[in-house]
Amino acid sequence: MFPMVDSHSSPSDDVPLGLRERRRQETRRELADAALDLFERNGVHGTTADDIAAAAGVSARTFFRYAETKENVIFLDDDGFNELVTRVRHDVDGGTPVIAAIERAQRDLLEVFDDEHPDQHERVLRVRRLVISEPALLAIALAIDAEHVRQLAQIVLEANGSDSELEARILVTALGTAHRLAFDEWVRRTENGEQASTRALYAEILDGLRNYFSATPTE
């Protein structure tokens, strides 16, 4: 799962949002926050879509315009992956090799996350604890990760003009694992009361992978 980038302070804030789009983002955040509070209090099984809609101050009809199920609501406000794809496509179109583009986009998004307000960091930790403890949410998070791999692998295939889907998925999965491990290590250190930078951890992990594979003989 991507560290959640606050849709109200994403790297593309220099592009003015229309009133309708800003209201759409606010509704997504209100629904996600309501779901988070209710899931923590009552559990996923003890919460209904109507409960979430009422807590967010919207109708049931509006709820289902934004989410297919109550479980999906908790992920509504996570714009990290969409932002990454936009950045990767932009850089690849500008001539950057696709793997370098993915690395740079991941680093930049982690830097944005590092600069978020502590309240946003605490919110991310709350979501993570909930996802780990609730099988229904964990299943959705894993499905989202699988879809992310598929989409990025397709970008790699298009950029490289390659037919090797397996190779593309290997590369994307390796980078995604480094990204996720940086976040997991940030969580571990944060919950131990330590200060940590996800961007610095990501760079350290990539360096470790490069050193390992360059020193490992192939048969």
Image: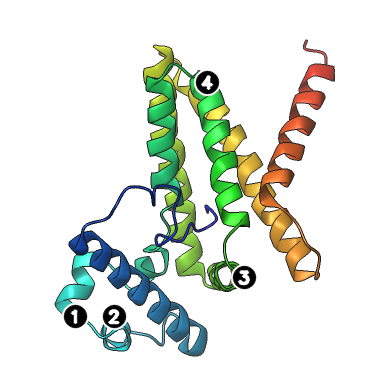
Q: What's under tag 4, amino acid-wise?
A: Glu
Residue at point 82% right, 13% down?
217
Asked if residue 210 is positioned above or below residue 63 in the image, the reply reads: above
Q: Quadrant of the C terminus?
A: top right
Q: CA distance from mark 4 to mark 1?
A: 44 Å
Q: Which is more N-terminal, label 2 or label 1?
A: 2
Callout 2 secondary element: helix
Q: CA distance from mark 2 to mark 3?
A: 29 Å
Please identify the residue farthest to the left as the structure is shown: 61
Q: What's under tag 2, amino acid-wise?
A: Ala
- Taking the image as shown, residue 154 lies to the left or right of residue 120, namely left
Q: Which is more N-terminal, label 3 or label 4?
A: 3
Q: How is the image coloured?
A: rainbow
Which residue is disc 2 drawn over?
A: 49
Decide: marks 4, 3 in contact (CB < 8 A)? no
Q: What's under tag 3, amino acid-wise?
A: Pro
Which residue is disc 1 drawn over?
A: 60
Which residue is disc 3 drawn over?
A: 118
- Taking the image as shown, residue 176 lies to the left or right of residue 72, namely right
Residue at point 77% right, 12% down?
218
Asked if residue 42 is positioned above or below residue 154 in the image, the reply reads: below
Decide: marks 1, 2 in contact (CB < 8 A)? yes
Q: Which is more N-terminal, label 2 or label 4?
A: 2
Q: Which mark is residue 167?
A: 4
Q: Which is more N-terminal, label 1 or label 3?
A: 1
Q: Which mark is residue 44?
A: none
